[in-house]
Image (spheres, rainbow, N blue to C red):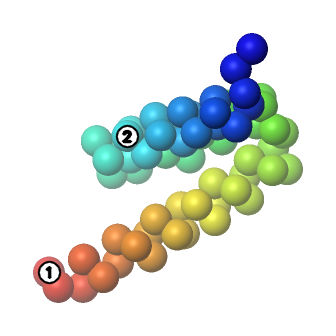
């Protein structure tokens, strides 16, 4: 059986790949799949915090444009 945290890593990786290709949609992919593994009470805040951290990392590169 696959470790749930390893599966969560693959889900988040795939979700960020979708975001990279389209510019949005990572939460649309990640939340339903992570909710199956961990429940919505964990998945929604986790993705929200993760998205905020990613946006903060992208922000300095956008300021120079």
The crowding category of the residue bearing disc 1, from other C-alpha atoms within 10 Å (few below 14, some 14 to 19, many at least 20), is few
Q: Is residue 28 visible?
A: no
* Disc on res. 17: 2
Q: Which residue is mark 1?
A: 65
The residue shown at (24%, 77%) is: 61
Specify few, some or many for label 2: CA neighbours under 10 Å numbering under 14, 14-19, or 20 or more.
some
Q: Quadrant of residue 45?
A: bottom right
Residue 46 horizontal/vertical position (percent) = 70, 56
Give the alpha-carbon distance from disc 1 to disc 2, as whole Å.
23 Å
Q: Residue furthest left?
A: 65
Outermost residue toward the top? 1
* Marker count (numbered): 2
Determine the secondary structure under disc 1: loop
Say whether residue 44 is visible.
yes
| Residue 17 horizontal side relative to residue 44, left or right | left
Instruction: Indicate the quadrant where residue 59 lies.
Output: bottom left
Q: Is residue 33 left or right of residue 61?
A: right
- Name the front one of labels 1 and 2: 2
Question: x, y percentage for residue 36?
Answer: 77, 29
Q: Residue at x 72, y 52 (%)?
A: 44
Secondary structure at numbered mark 2: helix
Q: Is residue 20 above or below residue 60?
A: above
Query: In what quadrant of the picture does the N terminus appear?
Result: top right
Q: Position of residue 20 (x, y in %)?
A: 32, 47
- Residue at image position (47%, 40%) is 13
**Lower sequence index among marks 1 and 2:** 2
Residue 53: image tag: none
* Residues tagged 1 and 2 counted as in contact (Cβ below 8 A): no
Residue at the image point whose x is 56% and y is 34% from the top: 11
Q: Position of residue 12 (x, y in %)?
A: 54, 42
Residue 5 or residue 17, whichever sits in front: 5
């Amino acid at each position: 059986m696959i470790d749930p945290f390893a599966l969560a890593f693959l889900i988040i990786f795939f979700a960020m790949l979708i975001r990279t290709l389209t510019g949005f949609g990572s939460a649309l992919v990640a939340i339903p799949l992570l909710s199956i593994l961990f429940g919505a009470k964990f998945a929604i805040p986790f993705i929200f915090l993760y998205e905020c951290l990613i946006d903060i990392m992208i922000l300095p590169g956008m300021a120079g444009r």
